[in-house]
Image: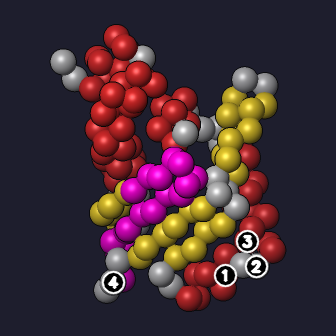
């Protein structure tokens, strides 16, 4: 029985509670690589720490010689009209120039607007909580 069949049968929350979190995370990583990141590079590693509200990712970006580490800290979810949206308190990377750029109010506003314009799928919210 596939992970998706199990999720439909038992419910996603139950599946994650009983050891399926890694499989769901791996599915999310594969989807990100195939559907989102392909033009830019590859997500090498994805670590999710729901209790700490932290996501850590390591990416191999095209044209870069070293992998990029990204940490999202203090994420929360808010509900609006039946849809869930993510907010992130802090984003840090392994590149000083990117961290400087991320500290600019304009960039922070753009990131917030991007997050608020894109509802978080239930499977992602469940995985992160």
Mark 3 is surrounded, within 10 Å at the Cα level, by few (under 14), some (14 to 19) or many (20 or more) other residues, namely few
Residue displayed at 36% across by 20% down: 7
Query: What's the CA distance linking mark 2 and mark 4?
Result: 24 Å
Name the residue located 33 percent from the left edge and 28 percent from the top edge: 18
Residue at 68%, 34% in the rendered image: 84
Inter-mark Cα distance, 1 to 4: 19 Å
Neighbour tally class for label 4: few under 14, some 14-19, many 20 plus, Cα within 10 Å: few
Is 24 situated left or right of 56 in this image?
left
Q: Please tell me whether mark 3 sits on a helix, a strand or a loop.
A: helix
Image quadrant assignment for residue 129: top right
User: Does residue 35 show up?
Assistant: yes
Give the structural element (helix, strand or loop) at label 2. loop
Crowding at dot 1, Cα within 10 Å, few <14 / some 14-19 / many 20+, comes out as few
Residue annotated with mark 4: 66
Give the camera-side residue of 125 and 17: 17
Please name the residue shown 67% across and 76% down the image: 102
Q: Are marks 2 and 3 in contact (CB under 8 Å)?
A: yes
Q: Which mark is residue 101?
A: 1
The residue range painted magenta reads 47-64
Task: Tell me the chief SS of the magenta region.
Answer: strand
CB contact under 8 Å: marks 1 and 2: yes
Badge 2 or badge 4: first in the primary sequence? 4
Q: How many marks?
A: 4
Tell me, yes or no, whether the two marked residues, 3 and 4, touch with CB atoms within 8 Å.
no
- The circle drawn on residue 107 is 3
């Amino acid at each position: 029985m596939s992970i998706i069949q199990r999720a439909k049968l038992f419910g996603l929350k139950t599946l994650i509670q009983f050891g399926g979190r890694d499989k769901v995370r791996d599915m999310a990583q594969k989807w990100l690589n195939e559907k989102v990141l392909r033009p830019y590079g590859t997500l090498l590693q994805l670590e999710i720490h729901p209790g700490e509200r932290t996501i850590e990712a390591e990416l191999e970006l095209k044209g870069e010689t070293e992998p990029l580490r990204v940490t999202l800290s203090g994420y929360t979810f808010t509900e609006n009209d039946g849809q869930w949206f993510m907010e992130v308190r802090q984003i840090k990377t392994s590149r000083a120039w990117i961290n400087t750029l991320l500290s600019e109010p304009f960039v922070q506003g753009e990131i917030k607007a991007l997050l608020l314009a894109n509802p978080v799928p239930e499977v992602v919210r469940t995985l992160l909580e």
